[in-house]
Image: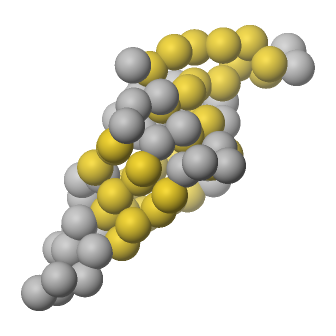
Amino acid sequence: MATLLLAAKRLTYTINTPTYTATSGTWANGSNPFGNTTAALNLNTNFIVPNGVTLTINNLNLNFSSTSKITIQKAGG
């Protein structure tokens, strides 16, 4: 479930699902799968970048919770 919350007078977007699997593309403020404008993304999830996916992140803050993981899968793995 994704939720919007107000923190320190700045709108943030929280990804709060067990797993989020990225697809190829470019993420930036106002141009990402979550449709936020200038907000940071707070990730409370296991973030997976599968083999073959090219993900470019430009000018966007990603905040990971203490329980989050980033997995970048390799070929043949």
In the displayed orientation, state which residue is furthest to the front: 67
Side (left or right) of 68 relative to 52: right
- Compared with 25, 31 (above or below) is above
Q: How many marks?
A: 0
Residue at 18 percent across and 74 percent down: it is 52
Side (left or right) of 20 relative to 16: left
Location of the C terminus (image quadrant): bottom left
Where residue 65 sits in the image (x, y, percent)? 65, 44
In the displayed orientation, state which residue is furthest to the right: 8
Q: Nearer the viewer, residue 5 or 30?
A: 5
Which image quarter: residue 49? Answer: bottom left
Q: Nearer the viewer, residue 25 or 2?
A: 2
Side (left or right) of 5 relative to 7: left
Residue at 37 percent across and 37 percent down: it is 18
Query: Is residue 61 visible to us here?
Result: no
- Compared with 16, 67 (above or below) is below
Which image quarter: residue 1? Answer: top left
Where residue 26 sits in the image (x, y, percent)? 38, 55
- Compared with 54, 19 (above or below) is above
Where residue 38 sits in the image (x, y, percent)? 65, 31
In the displayed orientation, state which residue is furthest to the left: 76
Where residue 23 sits in the image (x, y, percent)? 24, 53
Side (left or right) of 59 relative to 32: right
Q: Nearer the viewer, residue 51 or 19?
A: 19
Colouring chosen for the image of the structure: secondary structure
Residue at 20 percent across and 74 percent down: it is 51
Residue at 29 percent across and 69 percent down: it is 54
